[in-house]
Amino acid sequence: MRVLVSLLIGLVLISAAPASAKQFDADSFMLANGLRVVVVPFHRAPAVTQMLWYKVGAYDDPPGKSGIAHFLEHLMFRGTKETPPGEFSRIVSQNGGRENASTSPDYTVFFQTVAADRLELVMKLEAERMHDLLITEDQVTPEREVIIEERRTRVDNVPAALLGEQRDAVLFLNSHYRLPAIGWLNEMRGLGADDARRFYATWYAPNNAVLVIVGDVDLERVRSLAETYYGPIPSRPVPAHEALAEPAKVAATRLEMTSGHVASPQWSRSYLAPGYTQAGGTLADALTVLAEILGGGESARLYRSLVIEKKLAVSAGAGYGPYRGAGSFSLYAEPKDGVSVADIDAATMAEIRRLLTEGITAAEVDPIKKRLQASALYSRDSLSGVARIIGASLVTGRSLEDVEAWPERIGAVTPEEIMAAARQVLKDDAGVTAVLLPEKRS
Amino acid sequence: MRRSILRGALAVLFALAVSAGAARASGIVDIKSAGGVTAWLIEDHSLPLIALQFSFDGGAALDPPGQEGRAGLVMDLLDEGAGELDSHAYKTRLEDLSIRLEFEASYDAVGGAMRTLSANADAAFDLVHLALTSPRFDPVAIERVKTQVASELRQDAEAPRVIANRIWWHTAFPDHPYGRRSAGSQRSIAKLGAADLRRFVTERFARDKLTIGVVGDITPERLQALLDRTFGSLPVQAAKAVVADTAAFAEGALLVVNMPIPQSVVAFGERGIKRDDPDWYVALVMNEILAGNGLTSRLTAEIREKRGLAYGVGAGLSPLRHAGILYGSVATRNDRVGDVLEILRSEWRRFRDDGPTPAELEAARTYLIGSFPLGLDTTSRLAALLVSLQVEGLGMDYVERRAAALAAVTIDDVRRVAKRLLDPDRLRIVIVGAPQGLVGATEMAADGE
């Protein structure tokens, strides 16, 4: 019976536009302890991805302890009461599995992809470290050095990343999105076992997590495994995320950094934008389409104007980066050799003015919406791609229904909504300009 | 038509019972069109998507002296206008139809990867056809892309990781095309013109150099027709061109480029092994235990897990057509570079002298066997695999044979190959940063002089 149904769904998808009513057709249930479980069966290969998402991230780092959420993510691989340090990765690897983890401002996520018959094994391991983690000094000491080296690799050795960190600290005036997820170096040095233990005890609980399983599985098997391994973990009261709203931004700001390790200037202007939960989703969808119109490729407005027509830049684009409680909308360009940053700035702002005065037509918006809908279809081509979209949405304030209906909602975005969003966000007097300049050489 | 059941092969690897008749990705089929174009196909209708991967043998290593970067520039320009469509029209058509098309050049080959909704397959294959058979190379597009390449080259000249990599290859292969940058230099890029690019297209895009892999929502019959339309009109034979095999360099070196950054970037490696070497699978196992990229390798254990000296450390086999390389990298704080190098050399020596433990061998074999199919979870990765199986002559039953070959690797095999390949004195090490207290290092400028 299931085969027949999936065949029919396949036919509908092929003959109609890729915007089906439910893009993933996910099932979902909740354990008695509050763990939300989402299952997307996909039987192309006998493989399965487990992603466990905790609704806690760098946003929740306590004052003076920036980087602790990320540090704890690392320590989650350093052993539990049952599994000695290093054993978790060894077991996953010996079973042919691939694994990793990452920390963002809004969430911390752990994942493994394994053969479908090894799902039970990784569920057991993942459930174990949800409640039984051992944080000891002899594990904390070398791992703190690891995250500091990670910071040097990702940020301190990369001028554009350093500047980006400073920009976020200016763009977000009040909320913790101003803090780098990896932590400030001076504070990372002071992170200790007690900080990690406290953070773990506060936030890591089944009722503060979402488990996403995608692959060669069925709902009932996942339900029974989840009951067995995650079910016995007691729920605990978890605090609310500190609700710090951004004040109105009234001063345009300019950051300039000179580095001996950049070859060409880079220019960007960022605006404070709504996150997922503030805008009821509609505004976020409109901004997603707007970013695509301005900067979503080589036929988009900024590339076309700055790179192709005016020949001022080698690249240009735009992006919308929403978090749960706030977001940013950025324009960026790299001038051609010999072109000044001021000229790039002026040319980009001319495009923005043109957008705000002349507006956009349905004829320009429609193919872009189709392309975004198609990208949803492409994302279904990989197990981890599906798990990532679902998990990231559920832990940043959206519902499974929101996720499933995303292609439809994108299809419903109107030019008027896009223009309203553009006027709300792209305000001349509130942008943060960040300029990276090469050191002058004699 | 030969058939091999990939799904079955995957299942063997996963140590699963194969469920007969499962309506999933069915297997590799060898397709030949009426016009004689061949391709390997995995038909899979679980999503309305198609991935096409194709490759022409012969890449940047064939760039004539003074024209370094030619192959790369050609591939960068293929989607900048073709036939009646100028750059903007071509790109708008790709974007409006949600067709994802990328061209690229490596040392040994040039090629492309295309993904499309199956509903748009005709248009997508036609755009590939246009790009391969009538690229425009409009002067304005050439200028724009040359400016972009020049900008990337300038940026790369400041990026520690890129500098370390480039100097490593440049000094390891001083007299071979592998020692040159495949992207070329400011000087060579500036001199390239439309005629040079056209010559490359005429000489290299030919049927005898072409390999094709297709995966997804398409029947053999439909693909046959599209193969003829897309590739059928290409010349039968490419121009003759030869790249010499190169004797593997044998000398170790310790080179430093001074740069005032907080973390030193280290590239290291020595001669490795070519893909057709009978010891290939043994070398894979050896490298996994010593320097694999997971958290379980010896280098990761000693450098990262025990001492916190780096975020990541690892090495891999790099099997080029004309040379085999074992190449890795690590980044560490400037005052501990010496310690990291000492660990690197002593782990190299310990492995050569003592080999792996039985437990390490078992773990590496299971990981390499089990994780391989897990990395093939998208249509585009499968299509790329189909191309490399054909290029390397590995056969349709490769996934099974690979597993069998890995399972057969013994401790004595690994010991023997470790003695053959690992020599701490032969390690070529390039450091970019401000390392403290290094002894015996030769200073170099960032441009490799």
Image: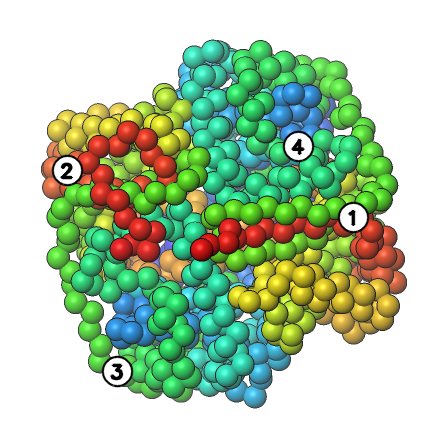
Q: Nearer the viewer, mark 4 or mark 3?
A: 4
Disc number for residue B375: none
Give amino acid for label 3.
Ala
Q: Nearer the viewer, mark 2 or mark 3?
A: 2
CA gap, disc 2 and disc 1 = 58 Å
Q: Are marks 4 and 1 in contact (CB under 8 Å)?
A: no
- Judged from the image, the secondary structure of the residue bearing numbered disc 3 is loop
Secondary structure of residue under mark 2? helix
The residue under label 2 is B425
Say which chain tag 3 marks: B
Mark 4 or 1: the one toward you: 1
Q: CA distance from mark 1 to mark 3?
A: 60 Å
Whether residues under marks 2 and 3 lie with C-beta atoms below 8 angstroms apart, the answer is no
Q: Residue at x 44, y 80 (%)?
A: B132
- Residue bearing the label numbered 3: B239
What is the chain identity of the residue bearing mark 2?
Answer: B
Q: Is residue A44 toward the left or the right of residue B251 in the image?
A: right
Q: CA distance from mark 4 to mark 1?
A: 20 Å
Q: Amino acid at mark 1?
A: Ala
Which residue shows up at 48% across the image and 35% down it?
A152
Please report the residue visible at 28 percent of the width from the left and 81 percent of the height from the top.
B238
Q: Which residue is mark 4?
A: A179
Front-most of residues B286 and A339:
A339
Does A241 sit left or right of B432 as displayed? right
Q: Amino acid at mark 4?
A: Leu
Q: Element at badge 4?
A: loop
Q: Which mark is residue A252?
A: 1
- Does label 3 lie on the same chain as label 1? no
